Image (cartoon, rainbow, N blue to C red):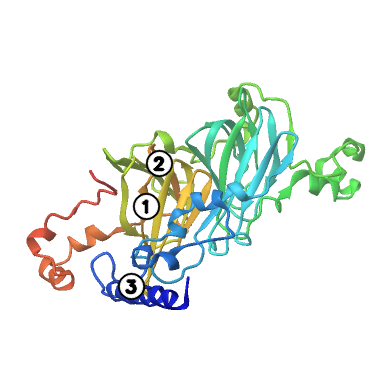
Amino acid sequence: MDQISRRVVLALGAVGGGVLAATAHAASFGNPDQPAEGAINANPAGLSDPGPKNPVLDSQFPSRGSPPATDIGDMPQFWSSFNTAAKRIQNGGWARQVTQSDFAISEAVSGVNMRLGPGGIREMHWHLAAEWAIMTNGRCRVTVLDPQGRAYVQDVEAGDLWYFPAGYPHSLQGLGPDGCEFVIVFDQGNQSEYNTLLVTDWLAHTPPEVLALNFGVPADTFKSIPLNDLWIFQGKEPGPLADDQAAVASGGTPPEPFTFRLGQSEPIRNNKSGKLQLADSSTFKVSKTIAAALETLAPGAVREMHWHPNADEWQYWIEGEGRMTVFDAGPRAQTGDFHAGDIGYVKRGQGHFIQNTGTTELRFLAVFKIAEYQEVGLSNWLTHTPPQLVAQHLNIDPAVLAKFPNDRPGILPR
């Protein structure tokens, strides 16, 4: 290309870029910011991404690579995943975790994903934090003792919950034929599954003569105890549930069960686009520090625009795929993509909505460090404010405002 031709091309490119920039700078509905945001407002050369890059990751996070034009500003990372967490594997099962040290925004709670094979035992232990969990696969036998000496033994399956208050000693064991998998939520962001108070550790680090005095048996009784903790180990599958329950019945029965069947509970919202099932202290009475909602969205459905005034929201995405946008003061708005095994987090009071972007059902768990679940829906607020006041804010006719959902549908369309 000669020098004159090159100058012509560059000049035409500059003119074209200037026209595009002028068009892009005009704020409009769905394109509200100046300077304008999003790929729709970029020229092809500026939009290109020659790399280096990871094509697999790019395909998983399209909303990060090309966010909507309505996204603006910065936010702490609100995506994490068990899929990228390292597994600790032992004979009998494995676990992986995401704590605040891995996921800075998660101040209120931490999460553990654990698998126990048939007969696999999570060693008898207790925590400084309360433990809440949901079963995602198989069957598990749980045991727990309250401070009054009342024992509780129960079998749980997919969709069931358990809750152990801080300091309550407990154990978990996978049952045949498939063992179990579950997700634990601790009510402290820095609580680690690898930093628990284990029965074998305490016995091994207590003088033999003290053990003899404490238990009223000869010190030699303890000569074969493990010198290292077991954590997760392969055990023998337990016998019938009724036998284990009878064996610990002498101390009496706790006033409230430590398990709850969330997956079989009556939904608090239910329509053609999905359902919400809730467990907080009003229904799962022993759970004083954790509330949770199991949310199911049909393909194309939207979890309505809302926020939670009393707690952060920690999410575990169980199946399907979707997209979440989070809104905060600033303005700030960011969109992220989520898949099965991922974790999301929304700070208290931040507006958000979730879309099922897949072709199959989306199910995720929303967990809150609070006894009582609370939610404020944007549509419910607008329809319970004097219509003339809302009309002056939004330039929408009151007759049209009257068509907004006013009964907290939760999931749309109905």
CA distance for labels 1 and 3:
37 Å
Q: Are marks 1 and 3 in contact (CB under 8 Å)?
A: no
**Relative to residue 360, is residue 289 depicted above or below?**
below
Q: Are marks 2 and 1 in contact (CB under 8 Å)?
A: yes
Image coords of residue 370 (percent x, y): 45, 57
Is residue 63 at all visible to an observer of this figure? Answer: yes
Instruction: State left or right for residue 136 relative to residue 178.
Output: left
Instruction: State left or right for residue 76 relative to residue 102.
Output: left
**Quadrant of res 246:** top right
The residue that mark 2 highlights is 362
Instruction: State left or right for residue 355 relative to residue 186.
Output: left
CA distance for labels 2 and 1:
10 Å
The residue that mark 3 highlights is 16
Q: Nearer the viewer, residue 10 or 389?
A: 10
CA distance for labels 3 and 2:
43 Å
The residue that appears at 60% across and 35% down in the rendered structure is 142
Quarter of the image with the C terminus in it: top left
The residue that appears at 45% across and 52% down in the rendered structure is 337
